[in-house]
Image: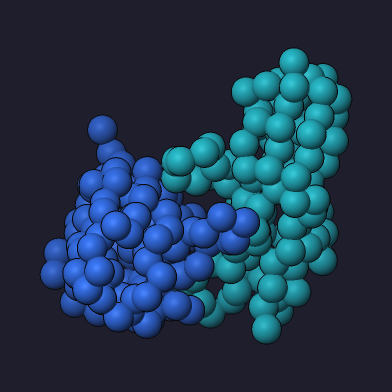
Amino acid sequence: EDQVTQSPEALRLQEGESSSLNCSYTVSGLRGLFWYRQDPGKGPEFLFTLYSAGEEKEKERLKATLTKKESFLHITAPKPEDSATYLCAGKVSGYSTLTFGKGTMLLVSP
Amino acid sequence: DGGITQSPKYLFRKEGQNVTLSCEQNLNHDAMYWYRQDPGQGLRLIYYSQIVNDFQKGDIAEGYSVSREKKESFPLTVTSAQKNPTAFYLCASSGGETQYFGPGTRLLVL
């Protein structure tokens, strides 16, 4: 069964304290690994898509990387406005649907 | 402004009642999706449609129904057969690999 597992479930950081969120997947034929940001009571906002091992993408303080078994979302010098739940999802070759992890809730304190 | 709209933002259902959640997109996307999100859970796929007049069941379709009569619209009906409907419902659409989400509808049971 295809699975996407995110860790930790929750992470509390001080402003400026860099860290990483993990997304491991056990899907065969991965055709894309997606990262989203979700604020409370709102729909997920698309951040990145990664397609192949070794690929990296950056946006402001966020950088997403992909290996053959997992993806990391690195947050450099976070600010309180980075507080949100971060979701990752995998797309399997031959299917149009996504399999989502349960998310990591990030809280950045000033 | 291109985007996905969902209405209403909050919906209350009485025992034995069917309710319909609206999802409209003006992105000219072929595919549309409905997800359910419960606290501490990942997004779970209810139904999806890749083309007008065609749709497929997702992982948790029981107690739900959909229609896709127009490209722009993909309404979801929560029937009385769904015994635990309280959740946050998210609609998404895609024109390629990436899914984009609407703002969500929170369904509560009276």
Colour that chain B carries in the picture:
blue
Q: In the rendered view, would you say A82 is above or below B37? A: above
Relative to the observer, which residue lies in front, A100 or B108? B108
Q: Position of residue A34 (x, y in %)?
A: 61, 54
Asked whether, in this view, residue B20 is left or right of residue A101, the answer is: left
The residue that appears at 25% across and 69% down in the rendered structure is: B15
Q: Classify B110 as above or below B59.
A: above
Numbered marks: total: 0
Residue B79 is at least partly visible in this image:
yes
- Please name whichever residue, B87 or A28, is drawn nearer the observer in this view of the structure: B87
Confirm whether residue B96 shows in the render: no
Across and down, in percent, residue B32 comes to: 33, 63
> In this picture, is A81 found above or below B110?
above
Residue at point 74%, 68% (across, down)? A25
Q: Quadrant of residue A15?
A: top right
Q: How is the image coloured?
A: by chain
Q: Residue furthest left?
A: B69
Q: Tell me the residue at 26%/51% (across/down).
A: B11
Residue A62: percent from left, percent from top: 71, 34
- The quadrant of the picture occupied by the N terminus of chain B is top left
Report which quarter residue B80 is drawn in. bottom left
> Where, by quadrant of the figure, is residue A105 drawn?
top right
In the image, what residue occupies the spot 79% across and 34% down? A12
Q: Position of residue A14 (x, y in %)?
A: 82, 23
- Judge from the rendering whether residue A44 lies leftward or rightward of residue A90; answer left or right: left
Asked if B59 appears above or below A62 in the picture, the reply is: below
Q: Quadrant of the C terminus of chain B?
A: bottom left
In the rendered structure, the answer to whether residue A38 lies left or right of residue B24 reads right
Can you tell which chain is drawn cyan? A
